[in-house]
Image (cartoon, rainbow, N blue to C red):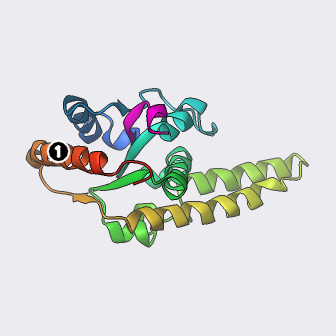
Amino acid sequence: MASDLRYDVFLSFRGEDTRHSFTDHLYHALLQAGLRTFRDNDEIDRGEELKPEIETAIIESRASIVVLSENYANSIWCLDELCLILEHRRKLNHFVLPVFYHVDPSDVRNQRRSFANEGSMWTSVANLTSNCLACLGVEAKEGPKWMEVNVRRWKAALTEVANLTGFQLSGYICFLSLFIHVYTSRLTNLLYYHQPGS
């Protein structure tokens, strides 16, 4: 299995929050530390299913860093990605390290503030879609059921990732370089000692 792994690290993040700031710095620091790192640079179409290359990259990575930022839970894409990462963790001993970027881990764990699924943007869109289909005379049997099943799945994933030991970042940007240096050194050591099957 270890020989099948193309990446050391898969980065999961909400692009609009951290792509051109923290995640970009982290990505380059991981590369400089010699870690093969996957970061999706493509714009993600709303409503699309998890792209096969993303799923493959998660499966072919030894670890994932999940950057939980203010708008992370407003993305169905990020939430589905998180579910796959955690499933891979449970089944294959995939190492997962959460980074709470300007968010409180207890808000993630308890789905408060921007991590509250009810009332979020995607819940409103799903309800609107269901209502529009009903106006057209199309019965949307899968809509509410799909939403209910996924909301339960996403809540469980947010709770699970918030219960993992990770890093909480807030405050000044000047601490980023120190954090990234310490973080990549620590991650390199963790990956070295966290071999599949050990």
Residue 118 is at least partly visible in this image: yes
Is 148 one of the magenta-colored residues?
no
Is 9 one of the magenta-colored residues?
yes
Does residue 131 appear left or right of residue 16 in this picture?
right
Q: Position of residue 168 (x, y in %)?
A: 24, 60
Q: Residue at x 56, y 65 (%)?
A: 118
Does residue 151 appear left or right of residue 170 in this picture?
right
Q: Which residue is mark 1?
A: 185
Other-residue count near label 1 (Cα within 10 Å), few / some / many at <14 / 14–19 / ≥20 = some
Q: Position of residue 165 (x, y in %)?
A: 31, 64
Question: In terms of depth relative to the viewer, which is nearer, 40 or 64?
Answer: 64
Q: Position of residue 136 (x, y in %)?
A: 87, 45
Does residue 28 appear left or right of residue 155 in this picture?
left
* Residue 99 against residue 2 in the figure, above or below: below
Does residue 65 appear left or right of residue 181 in this picture?
right
Q: Position of residue 148 (x, y in %)?
A: 69, 64
Quadrant for residue 15, please give it: top left
* Residue 84 against residue 145 in the figure, above or below: above
Count of marks placed on residues? 1
Q: Residue at x 31, y 41 (%)?
A: 18
Residue range in magenta is 1-10
Question: In terms of depth relative to the viewer, which is nearer, 74 or 178?
Answer: 178
Kind of element beneath mark 1: helix
Q: Residue at x 19, y 57 (%)?
A: 170
Q: Quadrant of the C terminus?
A: bottom left
Please state which amino acid type lies under the numbered disc 1.
Ser
Outermost residue toward the front?
Answer: 198
Outermost residue toward the top?
Answer: 42
* Residue 97 against residue 4 in the figure, above or below: below
Residue 70 is at least partly visible in this image: no
Question: In terms of depth relative to the viewer, which is nearer, 42 or 166?
Answer: 166
